[in-house]
Amino acid sequence: MRPSSASTTSPQASRNPRGDFFRGRGFLTLLLVAALLWSLTSLSWGSSPVHPGGLGSIGQFFQAAIRPDLSAEFLGLVVGSAWKTVAYAVAGICLAVGLGLPLGILASGVLARSPRVKVPGIAGFRFLLGAMRAVHELIWAWFFVAAVGLSPAAAIFALAIPYAGILGRIYADILNDVPDEPLRALRASGASEIKVLLYGRLPMALPDMLSYTFYRFECAIRSAAIMGFVGVGGLGMQIQLSLADLYFDEVWTLLYALVALVLLVDLWSSWVRRYLTS
Amino acid sequence: MTLLKLATRRPTIRPNPLWLSAVAFLVLACASWAYLLVDSGSGFRELFQSETYQQASDFLGQLAGLDAEGTPAFLQWDKWMETGALAYDTLAMSVLAMGIAGVAALLTFLPAARNVATGELASSASLPSQALYYLLRGLFIFSRGIPELMIAMIVVFAFSPGILAGALALGIHNYGILGKLSAEVVEDLDPRSARALRTSGSSVFQMMAYGILPQALPQFLTYLLYRWEVVIRTTVVVGLVSAGGLGREFLLDMSLFRYTDVALLLIWYLILVVFVDLTTMFMRRLAR
């Protein structure tokens, strides 16, 4: 999530003049309820939402939850595909940091002093980062497969592009939020903007940047798993194969492995973040 | 005094968890890259060859409709109208998904907060409330850990393909995320107003309504809007499986190599993303 959320609103802004309905929370509630009702009208209410026999197969699916396939040879396959998923996620995050860090520094506009360079630079790089993250990683993967063919490398680049877009934008925000006084001291002693960045901004921003990157790592595991949809190996691909063959016991083993993996990375990242922010 | 204490304190030899984590991540990264680069099937070598750039630029040309016969799809008005209807469905699917996730999370995030379940706030620690806490937290972990796309693959076993199936899959996944985030808000909030209400004789329900919800709901709303921005990007992907909205058409056009149609769908996709980003910005201003 974004580190600077609404909890930082100023007290002045939170005070809403009473009676001005269209600027307040009452109007917002009305809008949200209206949106939900509107979305319900777009459903087709005439036909039954459930397949004939659909509930039966869902029942079978959930029955398999208590007897996952734990045979030794299948567990070997699970461990192998879990490692593939982790490797793709780690490689993707490495590329995303490598791409997102320079773009984020450029998009924060901290290197330029004159506004004539600064303003178009910020706008251009922010737009580039926005375009990178607007398209979902699976769509990127599909384009890569259509353009250059199916390979793990394509999936890793497809993962890295939207993640670099997100990381770069957050890095830019964090670099801009660094307190100004120590930087002014550096500038007063004659440091160039690059030196201010290297010795002032980056060291101060590093804990927040690392903390957010670690949070994204958890998301990358999930994203790497769904790359199975375009044919890249890993947990997602195995889940898809087992689902297609209706081997629900295998599906559950793989789902448990995926959830355990995500939980493990989640625990690791929250442990690291606790040390970084305290 | 403190200086003396600091000076005489024996240096504790304990590995810094940050350094430990950094080393662990480096090892993991080296192992991953070694595995990928040594494995000849990974395709990194092929990716940096001149044919690859030729293929990529051909593909981009096809998206732009350079060598296609006939008018590109994004210059035909009726194509815009057709895909516009799908974009409308996609938007409805994302709103319905957020509705499902939001309502379900609102109903369950209080018992999933540790301080509520252990009776720290409500002073009603009971075995059922503790059991409910673990059950809900387990549910959050599961629905959060499984990606939307896989939930969609399972949901279409029972539900007819369409908007509802996709919204359900998106809703289940985001329920886990919203539930966890909002339960953590309750765990972190200032317990004094709730305790004051409780000691002055209000019921548990009154304490929740006047002591906890007013503090937690604005943050919940922020998370809901933030998730909506993410969900609108994912709705297209879930549509690939659940056959609703832009995703179904995307699958069809990619399979039939109708690349100018794909480009049109991509334009609608970006319009939706920008529209939702602007709407949430407006709504955040209302929530302040």
Image: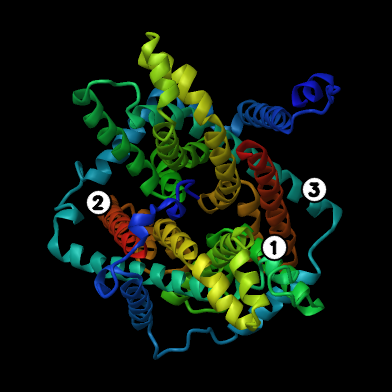
A268 on left or right of B285 = right
B210 on left or right of A71 = left
Cα–Cα span, label 1 and label 2: 37 Å
Q: Chain of mark 1?
A: A
Residue at (27% x, 20% y) in the render: A113
Residue B251's place in the image compared with B46, above or below, is below
Q: Chain of mark 3?
A: A
B223 on left or right of A222 = left
Residue at (75% x, 60% y) in the render: A253
Give the image quarter of residue A260. Answer: bottom right
Which residue position is annotated with label 2? B260
Residue at (80% x, 19% y) in the render: B7
Query: Residue B244 got which mark?
Result: none
The reply to whether callout 3 and callout 1 are in contact (CB within 8 Å) is: no
Which residue position is annotated with label 3? A76
- Residues packed near mark 1 inside 10 Å, few (<14), some (14 to 19) or many (20 plus): many
Which residue position is annotated with label 1? A251
Looking at the rendered structure, the number of numbered marks drawn on it comes to 3
Residue B41: percent from left, percent from top:
59, 33
Residue B2: percent from left, percent from top:
76, 26
Residue at mark 1 shares a chain with residue at mark 2: no
Secondary structure at badge 3 equals: helix
Check disc 2 and give the amino acid type. Thr
The reply to whether callout 3 and callout 2 are in contact (CB within 8 Å) is: no
Q: Is residue A26 visible?
A: yes
Give the image quarter of residue B90. Answer: bottom left
Q: Chain of mark 2?
A: B
